[in-house]
Amino acid sequence: MEALARLIARASELLDRLERQIPSAPADPDWAGAIAFRWRGTGHAPSLQHIRNPHRLALADILCVDRQKCELDRNTRQFIRGLPANNALLWGSKGTGKSSLIKALLNEYAADGLRVIEVDRRHLVELPDILDLLYLRPEKFILFSDDLSFEADDAGYKALKSTLEGSFSAPPANVLIYATSNRRHLLPEYHEENLLARQVEGEIHQGEAVEEKISLSERFGLWLSFYPFNQDQFLDIVRYWLDRFQTPLNDWETVRAEALRFALQRGSRSGRVAWQFAKDWSGRTRLGA
């Protein structure tokens, strides 16, 4: 009996060790408790993590890009209503509201079932795994990849290209991809590539390298370009955020001069710089009051 007890204890110890080595079944995401998620990768538990405190930007907070805002808002409303809608590429100058616009759209339409999953570039190779999770969900999901750019041999580049169009697997009707980038074609472009263009019966045909780069960006059905703000637009954004921060503007000329000096130091009159100045000025004003 004593030998049997030792054997049972030994077997129990071995089973405990084995259970620790076998990964547990992944828990279902907290679909009901969150509107924004972050894909952490198939090697993490959970792979899809909900974001507890998403940005609370409103569409009214996104200034000086009215055309782009109107276009992306319309596309998103089509998507939410189950109508045909396009994947979108927002490209152009930094700090002009590309990613902020997507955050604001989430807050605008979360009550209508819109959700956002943030996917880092290094995880784009796992897009098929992400889509498998979403096929049967009732919500509408935007897969959001921020500040996207690739090198020519990047595996994520090929995975994204295949997911947008080209895979045998049909994309879910409840998923769109919204990406932002400083590059129109998401890949570095070189002057010598233009020299490979050729004429065929009077028509210009790009070289293979250029064609390959264009082939990814053209799979986004909606292109929205964002350009640097001029001085008046920059100051309009400054005034908007100072008002939001409830900062007195008794001497606008002084504030105006300081805002332009702030922008000059950073070499940019972007919306991001305007927001940063407004925070700095509002904080300093209140501290000295």
Image: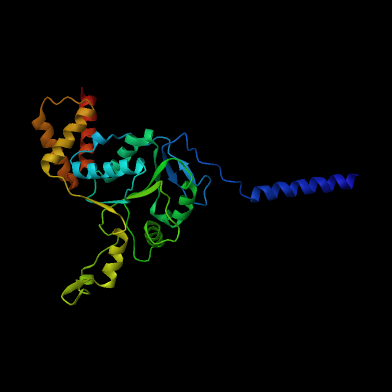
Q: Is residue 204 above or below residue 15?
A: below
Q: Is residue 96 visible?
A: no
Q: Nearer the viewer, residue 217 or 270?
A: 217
Residue 173 at x, y = what percent?
41, 48
- Quarter of the image with the C terminus is top left
Residue 6 at x, y = what percent?
84, 46
Residue 242 at x, y = what percent?
20, 30
Q: Is residue 193 above or below residue 289?
A: below
Q: Nearer the viewer, residue 247 or 42?
A: 42
Judged from this view, the residue extending furthest toward the top is 289
Q: Nearer the viewer, residue 127 or 220?
A: 220
Q: Is residue 114 visible?
A: yes
Visual colour scheme: rainbow
- Quarter of the image with the N terminus is top right
Decide if residue 244 is on the left or right side of residue 53: left
At a point 74% along the width and 50% down the height, the residue shown is: 14
Decide if residue 94 is on the left or right side of residue 8: left
Q: Quadrant of residue 272?
A: top left
Judged from this view, the residue extending furthest toward the right is 1
Q: Quadrant of residue 207?
A: bottom left
Q: Is residue 276 above or below residue 201?
A: above
Q: Is residue 64 above or below residue 154?
A: above
